[in-house]
Every structure is written in structure tokens, then in C-alpha cells.
Image: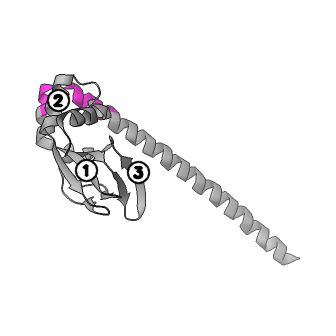
Amino acid sequence: MLNSFERLLLVRGVPIFQELRDDFLVRLASIMDEHSFNSKEVIFTQGQEGRSLYVVAAGQVRVHIGDQDLVLLKKGEFFGEMSLFDAEPRSATVTALEACDCLVLTQQQLYEAIDETPEIALNIIRILSRRIREINVKLNVKDNDLVNLKVKLEQERQVVPRSQRS
């Protein structure tokens, strides 16, 4: 169990909360629930309904789609934020890589917090935008890799018939 000071330090370190006043952070940290997960325990699965944001308080989690890792998250990092804003099911599965603790903020708690302090919504938009940009960069790199492989394969296909002619 985290004490109130540890909760405050953890919440203060989360990017979407960094620009908030200390009095609000204290309140936010105090209303978040703490959940513990065992090593290899699935926290939630892709396609599952959910309306909570998780902040890793201890341990490490793996965000993945099937066997494809999207990201590994450690203390102070967060996940599940997309489900707070849309009615869509979870976009990925999250599994504890080791025993871990998470602070959990529900959609209702967040909406009440946004009503009180609208700056939190702007912070969340910035973070989500940054994540989308990072994913786009990764996709562009993979797309370029595929184009290069296609060119190389085409070049090799042209070499094979010539060598068979001799």
C-alpha cells in the first residue's frame, strides 16, 4: 500500500497531471484506487469494456496485441487512457510482467476532476497527440523497410533469370 505522500509523488510525475496545482493533485491521488496484480496476470484484454486509466506504481507491464509488444511501461507511466474518452473497447491487452501495483482513475472520477480543473483535458490531449505521432513515425519506418525489401526482392528476381541463361 502506498501512503498519501507516495501517491502524491507518483501522480505528480504522470505527464497528464504535471501542470496541475498541488491541492488538486492531493485530491486526485487520494481518490484513486490501488490494485495489485501478480506476475503474468492479465490486467485487461483487447476488446474488453473499460473506463479506467492505470498508473504503474510498482513493477512493469506489457501492452500488446497478441504476441506483438507495443510498449513496456514501468513506475510512473500510465495506460488505458483511451477508454476514458470513447465508448470503444480496449485497443490492446495489458499484462503484468512482474508483480505490480497500479493506481486506478475511473472515467467518472476523471470527468469530475476535469469539471473542476479543465487544464487536465488539455494535458491529456497533448499526451495522446504525442503518442499518435510516435506511432506514425514507427509506421513510416516499417513502411520504408517494406519498400526497401520489395526493391531488393525485385532486383534479386531480375538477377536469377540472367544467371539461369548462362
Using the image as rendered, state which of residue 10 and residue 131 is in the foreground: 10
**Mark 2 sits on what residue?**
26
Find residue 122 and report its image quarter. top left
Identify the residue at horizontal 42%, vertical 57% (top origin). 69
Q: Amino acid at mark 2?
A: Val
For the image, the number of numbered tags is 3
Residue 162, relative to residue 152: is it above or below? below
Q: CA distance from mark 1 to mark 3?
A: 18 Å
Identify the residue at horizontal 73%, vertical 62% (top origin). 155
Report helix, strand or loop for mark 3: strand
Marker disc for residue 152: none
Mark 1 or mark 3: whose residue is earlier in sequence: 3
Q: Which-is-in-front pick, marks 3 and 2?
A: 2
Is the magenta region chiefly helix, strand or loop? helix
Q: Amino acid at mark 3?
A: Val
Using the image as rendered, state which of residue 60 and residue 128 is in the foreground: 60
At which x and y percent is residue 130? 39, 36
Q: CA distance from mark 3 to mark 2?
A: 29 Å
Side (left or right) of 141 relative to 97: right
Report helix, strand or loop for mark 1: strand
At which x and y percent is residue 9? 27, 32
At which x and y percent is residue 27? 13, 30
Neighbourhood count class around disc 3 (C-alpha, 10 Å): few under 14, some 14–19, many 20 upward: few
Look at the numbered discs 1 and 3 and tell me whether their residues touch, using CB distance below 8 Å: no
**Mark 1 sits on what residue?**
101
Residue 93, relative to residue 13: is it above or below? below
**Mark 3 sits on what residue?**
71
Report helix, strand or loop for mark 2: helix
At which x and y percent is residue 76? 32, 40
Q: Which residues are magenta?
A: 113-126
